Amino acid sequence: MGCSPALERLDSVTTPQSIVVLGSTGSIGTSSLDVIRSHPDRMRLLGATAFRSGKRLLNQAIEFQPDWILLGDEAAAKQIDTTSLAPKTQFFAGNSQLDQLIRSDATDTVISAIVGAAGLQATWAAVDAGKRVALANKESLVVAGAIITARAAETGALIFPVDSEHSAIFQALQTGRKQDLRRIVLTASGGPFRGWTLEQMKTVTPEMALKHPTWEMGPKITVDSATMMNKALEIIEARWLFGVSADQISVVVHPQSFIHSFVEYRDGSVISQMSPPDMRLPIQYALTFPDRIECPCPDTDWTVASSMELFPPDFEAFPALQLGFEVAKSGGTAGAILNAANEIAVDRFLKHEIRFDQITQVSHNVLNHHTYDAQPTLEQLQQADHWAREEALRWNS
Ligand code: NAD
Ligand code: MG
C-alpha cells in the first residue's frame, strides 16, 4: 500500500505534530479538531481551510490560534471580518497560496478532508511534498489512485487511511504479511434503504436520502451511502491503498456499523477491527500510528446485549456496487469519470432534477460513453473529470 514498507520502521511521533486540516469546517474536519484539542502535547493546528463557511472557520481560528487559515471562495472571503483573529494568525482569501502552505517545511501532517475531486490538488501537493497524509478525501484516490500511490512511494509520503473501513483494514493488516493476504472484506451499513427494491428507490426524496441510520456525515457522502456509491468508491480506494486486485475485495452488509471491515489470510483466519461508529478513532490513529492513545470517542459498552449481523449485498437494488468493482478492475481514466459523473448526479438529485435511482444510471451511462485511457497523466485525469461533469449535466432520462 501507499503506506507499507516504511511503516514498519516508523517510530512514535514524540514532538507535537504541526497539522494542516483541509476542510476543517466539515464533518471530518470538526472531528479532526476534536482530536487535536484532546492532545495538545502531541498535536498543534498549524493551518485550516474551508470553502464558504467563513464564520465557522473564524471561530475555529480564534480557539486554536493556528499560523494561518484560508477560505477558498473569494466572494465569501470578502465578507470576513478578520479583526478578531489573533495577530499571529494570517488570513488567506482564495486558493492561490494553498499549494505553498501545504508544501512548507512548517507542515508535518495534512488531514485531507475536503469533499469531492476538489480535494485532489491539495492531496497531491501533500503527497508530492512527502508529508504524512491522513486521507479522508477518498475521491482523490478514486480519480488518481495509481499516480498518487506511485508518487508517495517516490517522495516517502505516508498515506494513512481515515475512512473507517480502510483504517480497519490497515489495522487488521498489522497482524500478518501482505503475501499471505487472501482478501479484504469491506463492511457497509447498507444505508437507509437496505432491503428496498430498485422500484421502491424511485420514490426516494433528498430529505429521505440525507438521513443516515448510523453515521453523521456531510451531505454528499450521506447520499453516496444511500445509493451505495460510497462503497463503490471505497472498493476503488482499497484497490489503490492496499495494492490488491478487484477480485480480492468483497463487500458485506453490516447494519450496526460496529465491525469496520475484515481481512482474510490464506489460512482462512479473518481479522477485524471493531469500535462504536465514531470517526475520531480512525482520524486519531492516522495521526498517532504506530501509537495508540486515549481517544475522545465512545467506548464499547460490554454490559448491554447486542448483535452483529452480516448479509450479502443486493447488487440488483444497488447497481452502484457493480460499477465500483468494474472501475477498480479497469483503472486508467475510469475512476475519474465515475467520480465526476456521480458528483454531478448527486448534486442534480439534491436539486430535484433527477430521481434517486437515476444517480447510478447517470454514472453508468457516462462511464459507458467515455474514451478510455489506461495510463493518463494528472492533467488528462482533470480533463476526463471535466468531460464527465459536462456529460452528467447534459444527461436526460
Ligand atoms: P463535509 O461536506 O461535511 O465537509 C467538506 C469540507 O470541505 C468543508 O470544510 C468545506 O468547506 C470544504 N469544501 C467543500 N467544497 C470545497 C471546495 N470546492 N474546495 C475546497 N474546500 C471545499 O464533508 P465530510 O463528510 O467531512 O467529508 C469530507 C471527505 O471525507 C469526503 O471525501 C468524504 O468522502 C470523506 N469521508 C467522510 C466521512 C464522514 O464520516 N463524514 C467518513 C469517511 C470519509
Ligand atoms: Mg467509509
Image (cartoon, rainbow, N blue to C red):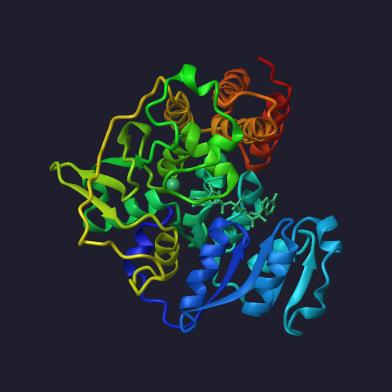
Instruction: In this rendered view, identify the residue nearer to me: 125 or 197.
Output: 197
Name the residue at 43% across, 53% down. 2
Q: Vertical placement of 67 versus 95: above or below?
A: below
Q: Residue lying furthest top in this view?
A: 397
Q: Vertical placement of 355 versus 158: above or below?
A: above
Q: Vertical placement of 315 versus 157: above or below?
A: above
Q: Residue lying furthest left in this view?
A: 267
Q: How many numbered circles does the render carry?
A: 0
In the image, taking residue 57 as reference, residue 175 lies left or right, namely left
Name the residue at 31% across, 57% down. 275
Q: Where is residue 103 in the image (x, y as percent from the top left)?
A: 64, 66
Q: Where is residue 350 in the image (x, y as percent from the top left)?
A: 65, 35
Q: Residue lying furthest front in this view?
A: 304
Residue 27: in sight, yes or no? yes
The quadrant holding residue 174 is bottom left
The quadrant holding residue 207 is top right
Q: Quadrant location of the C terminus?
A: top right
In the image, taking residue 218 as reference, residue 188 lies left or right, namely left
Name the residue at 26% across, 62% down. 301
Q: Position of residue 46 (x, y in %)?
A: 62, 75
Name the residue at 37% across, 27% down. 195
Q: Position of residue 164 (x, y in %)?
A: 40, 52
Instruction: In this rendered view, identify the residue nearer to me: 65 or 137.
Output: 65
Residue 130: in sight, yes or no? no
